[in-house]
Structure formats: structure tokens, C-alpha cells
Image (cartoon, helix red, strand yellow):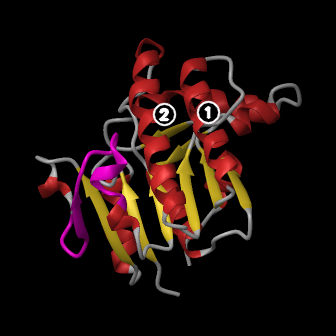
Amino acid sequence: MTRNVFVAGGTGYVGRRLLPMLLGRGHRVRALARRGSESKVPPGCDLVVGDPFDRRTFEDHVDGCDTFVQLVGVPHPSPRKAQQFLDIDLRSARESIAAAASHGTAHFVYVSVAQPAPVMRAYQSARRQAEDTLAVTGLARTIVRPWYVLGPGHRWPYALVPLYALLERLPATRATARRLGLVTLPQMVSTLVHAVEHPPERERLIEVPEIRATRSG
């Protein structure tokens, strides 16, 4: 079934790969971009120029979309960016959620983060607050919880792959290693496409093991 998808954060790390995939599968896509970033939106998308921190600049364009995908976030998250997680990740998510709720969007897809975890607590807190805000709306929702997405410019954790393999074999660390495991950019994109095409009746939580196993189609 063809979906009408509104994407916030489509010019970012994951979004730049997701938009062409959605278009290639026949979906209609409206992509929100800040002024000056219009050229990053691929041909075929309906371009919406607006401010992700002010829903008044884009919420009218949410009308008619059955799916909202929220991807806005701080690039290269690290503990030193704690305030940015509130100012960017959480603030933009709340604006997007409010816009989707006001227009009765049937399905909201939110990229959160794996939790609990012993590090990046501020990042987890901001994303969990967004999850809680989304739950209050009652919108049908898919929450995707990766830990670290491997891809161009994000390759240094490949050095940790042997360690993860060892930890996944040990009973005492297996569950944590799997929940906080590494996923690839293609796996994330496939997961998001699958989420768009298979909305839940109420709520679905997709964590690292499911991200690794998901295939679109």
C-alpha cells in the first residue's frame, strides 16, 4: 500500500538514505528541510521548507500524511552534548509530535535509542522523554531503538565487533551485548521502511536484535 509520509530530519545521516528508498518503493514523501538545506532533499520528494523547532512553519503540510517519521537529532552524539539533546532532539520531537497529533496522523515512527545503558544517560533521557510525550497522544507509534549505527563517517566502532561477539557468547553479558549491539546503516533504513509499510495497531518497539533481522518487503 502506498503511504503518504512526512519526514523530519530527512537531510541527515539516516534520512538521506531513507528518502530515496521510500520513493523507490512507490511512497509519496514530504521532506522537511531548513532554509539553506533544500538541495539535500532528493528529486521526487515534496519539499517543505520550515523550522523543525517551530511546528507552525510546517504543520499544515502534515495534513494528508498517514505516516510521520521523526529523525531530527544531534549528529555524532557524545556525553559532552547533553544540553544539545534537550535543545535539538527533544525540542524538535515535541514539535513534530504535536503537529502529527493535531492532524490525526495515523502512524508516528520515532528513532529513539537503546536503553537502559551505562553511558550516554542524557541522550537516553531526552529520547525517553520524547517517547513519553508520544505515548500521551495515543497515536499509533513505532519506536526504533538502535545503539550505534555503523556507516560512512561512523566506522570506528567496527574495532569493537570482536568484543561484542565475545560478550554475546557469555551468559552474564549476552542480553546486554545484544540490546546495546551495533547495527548498520542499511539495517536501519530497512527497519524504517518496514515500519512505514507495516504500521502497528497501537505500539511497536523495535530494538537492536529486531533491527538486525528486519528486511523491507
Residue where numbered disc 1 is placed: 129
Q: Are marks 2 and 1 in contact (CB under 8 Å)?
A: yes
The foreground one among 147 and 150 is: 147
> In the image, what residue occupies the spot 76% across and 35% down?
168
Q: Amino acid at mark 2?
A: Leu
Instruction: Indicate whether residue 90 is drawn in magenta.
Output: no
In this picture, residue 180 sits left or right of residue 56 = right
* The residue stretch that appears in magenta: 42-59
The foreground one among 59 and 124 is: 59
Quadrant where the image shows the C terminus? bottom right
In this picture, residue 139 sits left or right of residue 72 = right
Q: Which mark is residue 193?
A: none
Q: Position of residue 31 (x, y in %)?
A: 30, 62
Residue where numbered disc 2 is placed: 90
Q: Amino acid at mark 1?
A: Gln
Q: Earlier in the sequence, mark 2 or mark 1?
A: 2
